[in-house]
Amino acid sequence: MRSTIVYFSQTGNTEKVTYALYERLQARGYTVTPLMYEDAADFPEALEGVELLGVGFPTFFGYPPRFIEQFLRGLKKTKGTSAFVFTTYGGATAGDSLYEAASALKKKGYTILGGLKLEGSDSYPQGRELKINAGRPDEDDLTIATEFVDRILEAKAAGRSLDIEKLATPTPFFAAYHGRPHAALVRKMRKEIEGKIVFNQEQCLFCETCKKSCPTRSIGTGEKFPEFSWKCIDGLRCYQCVRVCPGKALSAEYPGALEDYLKFRAESADSPEEKRRTTIVA
Protein backbone atom coordinates (compact mmCIF):
# COMPACT_ATOMS: atom_id res chain seq x y z
CA MET A 1 0.00 0.00 0.00
CA ARG A 2 1.39 3.35 -1.07
CA SER A 3 0.73 6.80 0.30
CA THR A 4 2.20 10.20 -0.53
CA ILE A 5 1.91 13.26 1.67
CA VAL A 6 2.47 16.51 -0.21
CA TYR A 7 3.10 19.38 2.17
CA PHE A 8 4.24 22.97 2.37
CA SER A 9 5.74 24.20 5.64
CA GLN A 10 7.02 27.72 6.07
CA THR A 11 8.19 27.51 9.70
CA GLY A 12 8.26 23.78 10.43
CA ASN A 13 4.83 23.45 12.06
CA THR A 14 3.20 21.64 9.15
CA GLU A 15 6.29 19.52 8.60
CA LYS A 16 6.16 18.37 12.22
CA VAL A 17 2.57 17.19 11.74
CA THR A 18 3.48 15.62 8.39
CA TYR A 19 6.05 13.36 10.01
CA ALA A 20 3.69 12.35 12.80
CA LEU A 21 1.23 11.25 10.10
CA TYR A 22 4.03 9.60 8.14
CA GLU A 23 5.22 7.55 11.10
CA ARG A 24 1.73 6.33 11.95
CA LEU A 25 0.95 5.38 8.34
CA GLN A 26 4.26 3.50 8.17
CA ALA A 27 3.35 1.67 11.37
CA ARG A 28 0.00 0.75 9.80
CA GLY A 29 1.71 -0.92 6.84
CA TYR A 30 1.88 1.87 4.27
CA THR A 31 4.94 2.79 2.24
CA VAL A 32 4.86 6.56 2.60
CA THR A 33 6.57 9.30 0.61
CA PRO A 34 6.64 12.69 2.34
CA LEU A 35 7.04 15.19 -0.49
CA MET A 36 7.64 18.89 -0.06
CA TYR A 37 5.39 20.96 -2.32
CA GLU A 38 8.47 22.66 -3.76
CA ASP A 39 9.72 19.29 -5.06
CA ALA A 40 6.42 17.91 -6.33
CA ALA A 41 6.99 18.99 -9.93
CA ASP A 42 10.33 17.15 -10.00
CA PHE A 43 8.88 13.86 -8.74
CA PRO A 44 5.57 13.29 -10.54
CA GLU A 45 5.99 9.55 -10.04
CA ALA A 46 5.37 10.06 -6.32
CA LEU A 47 1.75 10.87 -7.13
CA GLU A 48 1.20 7.97 -9.51
CA GLY A 49 -0.67 4.91 -8.34
CA VAL A 50 -0.99 5.89 -4.67
CA GLU A 51 -3.86 4.53 -2.61
CA LEU A 52 -3.89 7.43 -0.17
CA LEU A 53 -2.94 11.05 -0.79
CA GLY A 54 -2.42 13.57 2.00
CA VAL A 55 -2.12 17.32 1.43
CA GLY A 56 -0.92 19.62 4.20
CA PHE A 57 -0.27 23.34 4.47
CA PRO A 58 -0.40 26.30 6.83
CA THR A 59 -3.59 28.34 6.81
CA PHE A 60 -3.06 31.79 5.30
CA PHE A 61 -5.78 34.26 6.28
CA GLY A 62 -8.39 31.52 6.59
CA TYR A 63 -7.57 29.68 3.36
CA PRO A 64 -4.87 27.46 1.81
CA PRO A 65 -1.95 29.31 0.21
CA ARG A 66 -2.96 30.22 -3.31
CA PHE A 67 -0.17 28.17 -4.85
CA ILE A 68 -1.43 25.10 -3.00
CA GLU A 69 -4.87 25.67 -4.50
CA GLN A 70 -3.23 25.95 -7.93
CA PHE A 71 -1.32 22.73 -7.32
CA LEU A 72 -4.54 20.89 -6.43
CA ARG A 73 -6.29 22.20 -9.52
CA GLY A 74 -3.37 20.92 -11.61
CA LEU A 75 -3.57 17.33 -10.33
CA LYS A 76 -4.52 14.60 -12.77
CA LYS A 77 -8.05 13.29 -12.48
CA THR A 78 -8.56 10.06 -10.61
CA LYS A 79 -11.47 7.83 -9.76
CA GLY A 80 -12.01 7.28 -6.08
CA THR A 81 -8.44 7.51 -4.79
CA SER A 82 -8.61 8.21 -1.07
CA ALA A 83 -7.33 11.52 0.27
CA PHE A 84 -7.13 13.61 3.40
CA VAL A 85 -6.21 17.22 4.12
CA PHE A 86 -4.56 18.87 7.10
CA THR A 87 -3.49 22.33 8.17
CA THR A 88 -1.69 24.17 10.93
CA TYR A 89 -2.76 27.64 11.94
CA GLY A 90 -1.67 30.35 14.35
CA GLY A 91 -4.43 29.86 16.87
CA ALA A 92 -6.99 32.37 15.63
CA THR A 93 -8.72 30.44 12.87
CA ALA A 94 -8.32 27.71 10.30
CA GLY A 95 -11.14 29.40 8.39
CA ASP A 96 -12.31 27.50 5.33
CA SER A 97 -8.86 26.13 4.50
CA LEU A 98 -9.75 22.45 4.92
CA TYR A 99 -12.95 22.83 2.95
CA GLU A 100 -11.25 24.63 0.04
CA ALA A 101 -8.51 22.01 -0.25
CA ALA A 102 -10.94 19.09 0.02
CA SER A 103 -13.24 20.70 -2.54
CA ALA A 104 -10.39 20.96 -5.06
CA LEU A 105 -9.47 17.31 -4.50
CA LYS A 106 -13.05 16.14 -4.82
CA LYS A 107 -13.36 17.90 -8.18
CA LYS A 108 -10.41 15.78 -9.32
CA GLY A 109 -12.21 12.58 -8.34
CA TYR A 110 -10.66 11.94 -4.94
CA THR A 111 -12.65 10.40 -2.11
CA ILE A 112 -12.15 12.53 0.99
CA LEU A 113 -11.67 10.62 4.23
CA GLY A 114 -11.13 13.51 6.62
CA GLY A 115 -9.55 16.77 7.63
CA LEU A 116 -7.21 17.66 10.48
CA LYS A 117 -6.49 21.13 11.86
CA LEU A 118 -3.97 21.79 14.60
CA GLU A 119 -2.81 24.98 16.21
CA GLY A 120 0.79 26.05 15.78
CA SER A 121 2.91 28.92 16.95
CA ASP A 122 1.84 32.21 15.39
CA SER A 123 4.62 32.90 12.91
CA TYR A 124 3.76 36.53 12.16
CA PRO A 125 6.16 39.03 13.78
CA GLN A 126 3.43 40.30 16.10
CA GLY A 127 2.53 36.78 17.16
CA ARG A 128 6.15 35.89 17.80
CA GLU A 129 6.65 39.00 19.91
CA LEU A 130 3.56 38.13 21.92
CA LYS A 131 4.60 34.43 22.04
CA ILE A 132 1.18 33.30 20.82
CA ASN A 133 0.96 29.48 20.80
CA ALA A 134 4.67 29.13 21.49
CA GLY A 135 5.73 25.48 21.28
CA ARG A 136 2.72 24.32 19.30
CA PRO A 137 2.14 21.88 17.76
CA ASP A 138 3.16 19.99 20.88
CA GLU A 139 3.09 16.32 21.85
CA ASP A 140 -0.64 16.43 22.56
CA ASP A 141 -1.23 17.84 19.08
CA LEU A 142 0.89 15.13 17.49
CA THR A 143 -1.04 12.50 19.40
CA ILE A 144 -4.22 13.87 17.82
CA ALA A 145 -2.51 13.52 14.41
CA THR A 146 -1.68 9.89 15.15
CA GLU A 147 -5.26 9.14 16.19
CA PHE A 148 -6.48 10.89 13.05
CA VAL A 149 -4.59 8.36 10.92
CA ASP A 150 -6.27 5.46 12.68
CA ARG A 151 -9.69 7.01 12.15
CA ILE A 152 -9.28 7.74 8.43
CA LEU A 153 -7.93 4.25 7.80
CA GLU A 154 -10.97 2.85 9.61
CA ALA A 155 -13.19 4.98 7.35
CA LYS A 156 -11.29 3.81 4.27
CA ALA A 157 -11.66 0.15 5.24
CA ALA A 158 -15.39 0.65 5.75
CA GLY A 159 -15.79 2.37 2.38
CA ARG A 160 -16.96 5.65 3.90
CA SER A 161 -16.39 9.11 2.44
CA LEU A 162 -16.72 12.52 4.02
CA ASP A 163 -19.32 15.11 3.07
CA ILE A 164 -16.89 18.01 2.61
CA GLU A 165 -19.49 20.49 3.83
CA LYS A 166 -18.63 19.15 7.28
CA LEU A 167 -15.22 20.79 6.83
CA ALA A 168 -16.78 24.21 6.27
CA THR A 169 -16.19 26.77 8.99
CA PRO A 170 -19.13 28.07 11.04
CA THR A 171 -17.07 31.14 12.03
CA PRO A 172 -19.17 34.14 10.90
CA PHE A 173 -16.16 36.11 9.66
CA PHE A 174 -15.60 33.48 6.93
CA ALA A 175 -18.97 31.75 6.63
CA ALA A 176 -20.42 34.59 4.54
CA TYR A 177 -17.77 33.85 1.88
CA HIS A 178 -18.22 30.08 1.89
CA GLY A 179 -18.02 28.75 -1.66
CA ARG A 180 -17.54 32.26 -3.02
CA PRO A 181 -14.47 34.23 -4.16
CA HIS A 182 -12.58 35.41 -1.11
CA ALA A 183 -9.85 37.64 -2.54
CA ALA A 184 -11.45 40.79 -1.12
CA LEU A 185 -11.62 39.28 2.37
CA VAL A 186 -7.96 38.22 2.24
CA ARG A 187 -6.93 41.72 1.13
CA LYS A 188 -8.82 43.17 4.07
CA MET A 189 -7.10 40.84 6.52
CA ARG A 190 -3.67 41.49 5.06
CA LYS A 191 -4.15 45.23 5.41
CA GLU A 192 -4.92 44.79 9.08
CA ILE A 193 -1.98 42.59 10.08
CA GLU A 194 0.70 42.38 7.39
CA GLY A 195 3.67 44.66 7.94
CA LYS A 196 6.33 45.94 5.60
CA ILE A 197 9.70 44.17 5.42
CA VAL A 198 12.67 46.52 5.69
CA PHE A 199 16.18 45.66 4.46
CA ASN A 200 19.18 47.42 6.04
CA GLN A 201 22.16 46.96 3.72
CA GLU A 202 24.64 48.10 6.37
CA GLN A 203 23.81 45.11 8.57
CA CYS A 204 23.76 42.52 5.77
CA LEU A 205 26.48 39.86 6.12
CA PHE A 206 25.81 38.54 2.61
CA CYS A 207 25.66 35.07 4.10
CA GLU A 208 22.58 34.19 2.03
CA THR A 209 20.86 32.57 5.01
CA CYS A 210 17.68 34.31 3.88
CA LYS A 211 18.02 32.85 0.38
CA LYS A 212 18.65 29.33 1.66
CA SER A 213 15.71 29.43 4.06
CA CYS A 214 13.14 31.00 1.73
CA PRO A 215 10.41 28.35 1.30
CA THR A 216 9.41 29.61 -2.13
CA ARG A 217 12.88 30.44 -3.43
CA SER A 218 12.04 34.05 -4.17
CA ILE A 219 15.38 35.44 -2.96
CA GLY A 220 18.29 35.47 -5.39
CA THR A 221 22.00 36.33 -5.34
CA GLY A 222 22.86 39.89 -6.26
CA GLU A 223 26.28 41.44 -6.83
CA LYS A 224 26.58 42.76 -3.26
CA PHE A 225 23.34 41.89 -1.53
CA PRO A 226 20.51 39.38 -1.86
CA GLU A 227 17.86 40.23 -4.44
CA PHE A 228 14.32 40.19 -3.12
CA SER A 229 11.43 39.69 -5.51
CA TRP A 230 8.79 40.00 -2.75
CA LYS A 231 6.65 37.72 -4.86
CA CYS A 232 7.04 35.08 -2.19
CA ILE A 233 3.94 33.07 -1.44
CA ASP A 234 2.04 35.00 -4.11
CA GLY A 235 2.72 38.21 -2.22
CA LEU A 236 1.72 36.79 1.16
CA ARG A 237 4.82 37.32 3.24
CA CYS A 238 5.87 34.53 5.58
CA TYR A 239 8.70 36.52 7.24
CA GLN A 240 11.00 33.50 7.27
CA CYS A 241 13.84 35.72 6.04
CA VAL A 242 13.25 38.13 8.93
CA ARG A 243 13.29 35.29 11.45
CA VAL A 244 16.56 33.71 10.30
CA CYS A 245 18.74 36.70 9.37
CA PRO A 246 21.82 36.50 11.67
CA GLY A 247 22.81 40.12 11.05
CA LYS A 248 19.30 41.45 11.72
CA ALA A 249 19.43 43.18 8.35
CA LEU A 250 15.78 42.31 7.79
CA SER A 251 13.02 43.55 10.04
CA ALA A 252 9.26 43.92 9.93
CA GLU A 253 7.27 47.10 10.51
CA TYR A 254 3.83 46.50 12.01
CA PRO A 255 0.81 48.14 10.35
CA GLY A 256 -0.57 49.00 13.80
CA ALA A 257 -0.12 48.52 17.52
CA LEU A 258 0.04 45.05 19.03
CA GLU A 259 -3.30 45.76 20.67
CA ASP A 260 -4.81 46.22 17.20
CA TYR A 261 -3.38 42.85 16.15
CA LEU A 262 -4.97 41.13 19.12
CA LYS A 263 -8.27 42.87 18.47
CA PHE A 264 -8.36 41.77 14.85
CA ARG A 265 -7.45 38.20 15.79
CA ALA A 266 -10.37 38.17 18.21
CA GLU A 267 -12.78 39.44 15.53
CA SER A 268 -11.88 36.65 13.10
CA ALA A 269 -11.23 33.86 15.59
CA ASP A 270 -12.92 30.48 15.81
CA SER A 271 -15.05 29.79 18.85
CA PRO A 272 -13.58 27.54 21.58
CA GLU A 273 -15.93 24.78 20.35
CA GLU A 274 -14.67 25.11 16.79
CA LYS A 275 -11.04 25.02 17.95
CA ARG A 276 -11.76 21.75 19.72
CA ARG A 277 -13.09 20.29 16.45
CA THR A 278 -9.58 19.27 15.41
CA THR A 279 -10.52 16.19 13.39
CA ILE A 280 -13.41 15.69 10.99
CA VAL A 281 -13.58 12.14 9.65
CA ALA A 282 -16.00 10.22 7.41
Image: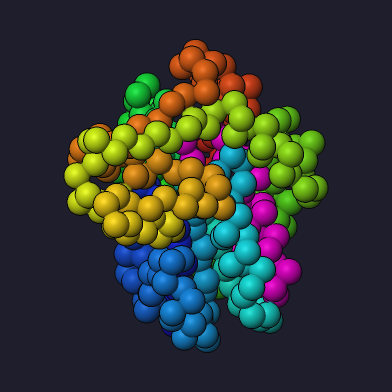
Residue 215 visible here: no
In the rendered image, the vertical position of residue 102 relative to residue 259, given as above or below: below
| Number of numbered callouts drawn | 0
Image coloring type: rainbow
Question: Residue 160: horizontal and vertical position, in percent?
Answer: 65, 67
Q: Nearer the viewer, residue 157 or 223?
A: 223
Residue shown at the point (52%, 23%) measured from the top left: 255
Indicate whether residue 100 is drawn in magenta: yes
Residue shown at the point (69%, 73%) measured from the top left: 108
Residue shown at the point (74%, 39%) measured from the top left: 184
Q: Nearer the viewer, residue 104 or 273?
A: 104
Question: Which quarter of the image is occupied by the C terminus?
Answer: bottom right
Indicate whether residue 126 is drawn in magenta: no
Which residue is at the far front? 223
Question: Residue 51: horizontal and vertical position, in percent?
Answer: 52, 79
**Quadrant in which residue 222 is drawn:** bottom left
Question: Residue 230: horizontal and vertical position, in percent?
Answer: 48, 48
Left/right placement of residue 6 relative to residue 72 reads: left
Residue shown at the point (50%, 66%) measured from the top left: 54
**Quadrant in which residue 214 is drawn:** bottom left
Left/right placement of residue 233 relative to residue 215 reads: right
Q: Nearer the viewer, residue 62 or 196?
A: 196
Over which residues does the magenta segment extend? 89-114
Residue 199 visible here: yes
Question: Residue 59: horizontal and vertical position, in percent?
Answer: 54, 45
Question: Which quarter of the image is occupied by the N terminus?
Answer: bottom left
Left/right placement of residue 250 relative to residue 119 reads: left
In the rendered image, the vertical position of residue 138 relative to residue 29, given as above or below: above
